[in-house]
Image: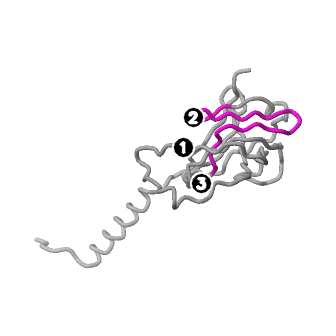
Amino acid sequence: MLTHSSGLARGWHAVFVACLLALAGCNPRMYDEVPALHDAKRAEVSGSWIGYDRTNVVFWPDGKADIRLLDGQEWDFDDRWRLSGTGTWKLTDKRTGWNDGQHVQLTLTSRTTVATRVPEPNEPPDPSADRPQTPKTYTWTFELRRDDKEALKLYFFFGDPDSRSTYILQRGEP
């Protein structure tokens, strides 16, 4: 009858547990390719788009934009600022985002208002003294995708981009 385990067995057990714990914290899709869209037209982007908590962006056909309460993308989202103002936009094929497809680049050139998003219950409070200064100008890069009805959606990643949390803008009512 065996009353103890060998050191080798304990070692393999420790390695297995360490690997399991490491994998448990990973998003299995974090390194998947971001879908690329190549058939979007400027006319599809032009118009009013709505998003989280009263976000509204109007892409005018002449390349100008009105921005209301748009959060920062990727790590900037964690600073909780929300920007409003005017700017410019363009639909581009240049690789600027997370894939080799088309993107919408939106640049805030004239900031009119800054708001602060209320922290979620699971977010740590962030003392305003430690918060970085809110930008006066800012550029967002939106990825593009289509839903099951072929309607265009604009989105960017927020927080840690590897988490693939998406901030989505959908076509507003005409």
SS state under label 3: helix
Residue 16 image point, x, y percent: 36, 66
Question: Along the horizontal axis of the image, is 82 left or right of 138?
Answer: left
Pointers 1 and 2 in contact (C-beta within 8 Å): yes
Q: Which mark is residue 117?
A: 1
Residues in magenta, as a range = 50-73
Scheme of colours in the image: one colour
Cα separation between marks 3 and 1: 19 Å
Residue 30 vs residue 157, the one in the foreground: 157
Q: Residues within 10 Å of mark 1 (few under 14, many from 20)?
A: some
Residue 44 vs residue 37, the one in the foreground: 44
Query: Upstream in the sequence, badge 3 or badge 1?
Result: 1
Query: Upstream in the sequence, badge 3 or badge 2?
Result: 2
Judging by the rendered image, the residue that carries numbered circle 2 is 53
Q: Residue furthest bottom?
A: 7
Query: Upstream in the sequence, badge 1 or badge 2?
Result: 2
Question: Along the horizontal axis of the image, is 160 left or right of 20?
Answer: right
Q: Amino acid at mark 2?
A: Asp
| Residue located 59% across and 36% down the image | 52
SS state under label 2: helix
Pointers 3 and 1 in contact (C-beta within 8 Å): no
Q: Kindly indicate the quadrant of the structure image that contains residue 155.
A: top right
| Residue located 83% across and 43% down the image | 90
Q: Residue furthest right?
A: 62
Q: Which mark is residue 161?
A: 3
Residue 75 image point, x, y percent: 59, 56
Residue 113 image point, x, y percent: 67, 42
Closer to viewer: mark 3 or mark 2:
2
